[in-house]
Image (cartoon, rainbow, N blue to C red):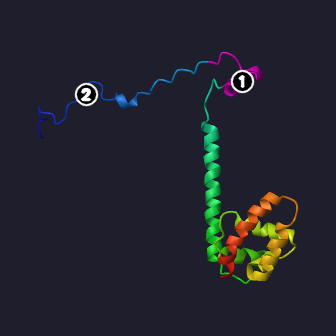
Amino acid sequence: MPTPSRHLHFLPLPLAQYSSYDDVPPPPPPAPAAPHAMSFSDLQQGLRDVNSGKVNDNTFRNGILALLALLALFVLIIQFRQRHKTPAAPPESLGSLGRHLGRLVHFPLGTKLLLKWVARSTTTPYPALLLSSELFDNCVDRWAHQPTFAVARNWGRGRLQCLRPILFD
């Protein structure tokens, strides 16, 4: 029978059953109670503070505006991708023909609107003004001699005459 060794291979701890990891943390202190319940006059005072400039916290408004801008950018990107993905079909109406022809010509700033104004005032289809030089000259002359907005029409006539070489030469 072997004799028990006097040298122990481990050291017994005084409290082997106790571990510091078994401690349960104390519960957090209770939140201080509100001094009083919020009333309508508190809301009114908060609105007055914001309107008077006493409080300048615009993070919510700026966040909403940023989200709307991102949404608009997302929609524009999808719309442009769809436009370039779909093959160009022949135009089915005068409006789509006018838009298609208008995209092929580089108009100076505001001139496309002037040309559409000429087409509407002279009851001429917009695409016809882009295709026929005689009709273009005739309609611009009739439009320029109408009495309403004479100053704008005289200014527009000069711009449209500068457009003529772009369209027909």
Image quadrant occupied by the C terminus? bottom right
Residue 131 sits inside the magenta stretch: no
Q: Disc 1 or disc 2, which is closer to the eye?
A: 1
Residue that numbered label 1 is attached to: 48
Mark linked to residue 13: 2
SS majority, magenta = helix
Q: Nearer the viewer, residue 69 or 123?
A: 123
Horizontal and vertical percent position of residue 76: 64, 62
Is label 1 in contact with label 2 (beta carbons under 8 Å)? no
Of the residues shown, which amino acid type is indicated by label 2?
Leu
Dot 1 lies on which element?
Answer: helix
Answer whether residue 156 is visible to the viewer in this image.
yes
Q: Nearer the viewer, residue 54 or 2?
A: 54
Q: Residues within 10 Å of mark 2 (few under 14, many from 20)?
A: few
Image quadrant occupied by the N terminus? top left
User: Is 130 drawn above or below residue 49 in the view shown?
Assistant: below
When asked about the image quadrant of residue 42, the answer is: top right
Q: Is residue 166 left or right of residue 134?
A: left
Which residues are drawn in magenta? Answer: 33-52
Residue at x 57% of width, y 21% of height: 31
User: Is 73 drawn above or below residue 136 in the view shown?
Assistant: above
Horizontal and vertical percent position of residue 147: 88, 61
User: Is 85 drawn above or below residue 30 in the view shown?
Assistant: below
Of the residues shown, which amino acid type is indicated by label 1?
Arg
Answer whether residue 92 is visible to the viewer in this image.
no
